[in-house]
Amino acid sequence: MEHDGVVQVNRGLETEAIISEVETNGYAIVENVIPRETCDAVLAKVDFLMGSLAIPFGQNAFLGRHTRRIFNLLARDRLFESVPTHGELLRVVEGLLDPECLLSSLTAIEMQPGQARQPLHADDGSYGFSRPAPTQIVVALWALTDFTNENGGTHVVPGSHRFDRRPGREDHPETVQVEMPAGSVVFYSGSLWHGGGENRSDARRVGLVNNYCAGYLRQEESQLLALSQDRVAAFTPRLRKLVGYGTYRGLLGHVDQRNPESLESHDIMMPTIRSRPTRHSPALNLLRGGREQGRRTGSTETRETERRTGGRVPPRLHNTTGERQRAPKGSRNVDVN
């Protein structure tokens, strides 16, 4: 039903009614769906991580100079494991996408007093499909504190998920603000034009962003690299599939024509991530080590070439077999290894 321009969906309404609201208006609010004790526990954990990880403020107008974000929450604490698989909420997401959807990212966002209004944008803006398009991104934004007009409740443009383009800087359409008490959730299409409001209050606004995508799209966070093998082993089967341990339509994401869900843990090569982020993950260090080895080999070879040619190094490339190839005419020296 309509209430001051904001679609209010009571908890008692059927999943199909919520899905219909999102398909029609681009968003729907479900009030008081998360138990208060759950909200309090999640908020306390977010506060702890903000301090222990020394999360910085954003460095531009879009990220917000009075806004802090914690990414990759599933790797931070097991408390967050029940968030993306919440039964009532996941049924809505699956109804808008399909049961083989993926968790694209899970992020905590804290907007502090003084935060300016965020530019309008669409969360599917990084994907190259034309518009309007079928729903391929769905966001479930949990309110861990009240969302009000004063503290920066999200601005939305109803029906904009059916527009034939993304918002631009010159666009200033009429918006409505999402106002909802802590424990509520707003669902919205990834194509919906929206943006955080201005926080004119003396209170912060904290939300938990569950971003889901169709099973054939690349996830916003690289879940298979971000999560340790031990952490994934402790997940429920549904959460494992949500982060990517499964296939889409029995094909996309297979490992030697096997479903990752069926693989034994020792068959999967996974990096380890600590609860506190390190400078480089093991996977990146492994890749970096390979590049450093290539540089060391290359520099030794270059010195030998310089000795033999009197300092003249011809522009050449190395292929993956170690054989030399001439560089294309007009190109610079490039290390392709």
Image (cartoon, rainbow, N blue to C red):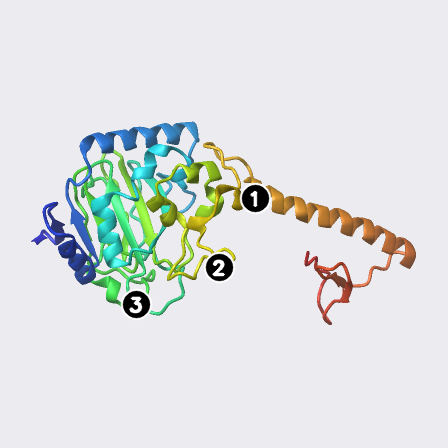
The foreground one among 66 and 299 is 299
Circle 1 packing at 10 Å, graded few (<14), some (14-19), many (20+), is some
Q: Is residue 41 above or below residue 249?
A: above
**Residue 202 visible somewhere in the drawing:** no
* Earlier residue among tags 3 and 2: 3
Q: Which kind of residue does numbered mark 2 sit on?
A: Gln
**Residue 333 visible somewhere in the drawing:** yes
Q: Secondary structure at mark 2?
A: loop
Q: Position of residue 58 (x, y in %)?
A: 40, 42
Q: Is residue 327 above or below residue 179?
A: below
Q: Which residue is mark 2?
A: 257
Name the quadrant of the C terminus: bottom right
Q: Which is closer to the viewer, label 1 or label 2?
A: 2
Q: Which residue is mark 1?
A: 283
Q: Which kind of residue does numbered mark 3 sit on?
A: Ala
Numbered circle sitting on residue 133: 3
Q: Position of residue 105 (x, y in %)?
A: 37, 47
The foreground one among 139 and 90 is 90
* Earlier residue among tags 3 and 1: 3
* Earlier residue among tags 1 and 2: 2
Whether pointer 3 and pointer 1 mark residues with C-beta atoms closer than 8 Å, the reply is no
Question: Marks 3/1: CA distance?
Answer: 35 Å
The answer to which quarter of the image holds residue 309 is bottom right
Q: Residue at x 20, y 46 (%)?
A: 88
Question: Marks 1/2: CA distance?
Answer: 24 Å
Name the quadrant of the N terminus: bottom left
Circle 2 packing at 10 Å, graded few (<14), some (14-19), many (20+), is few
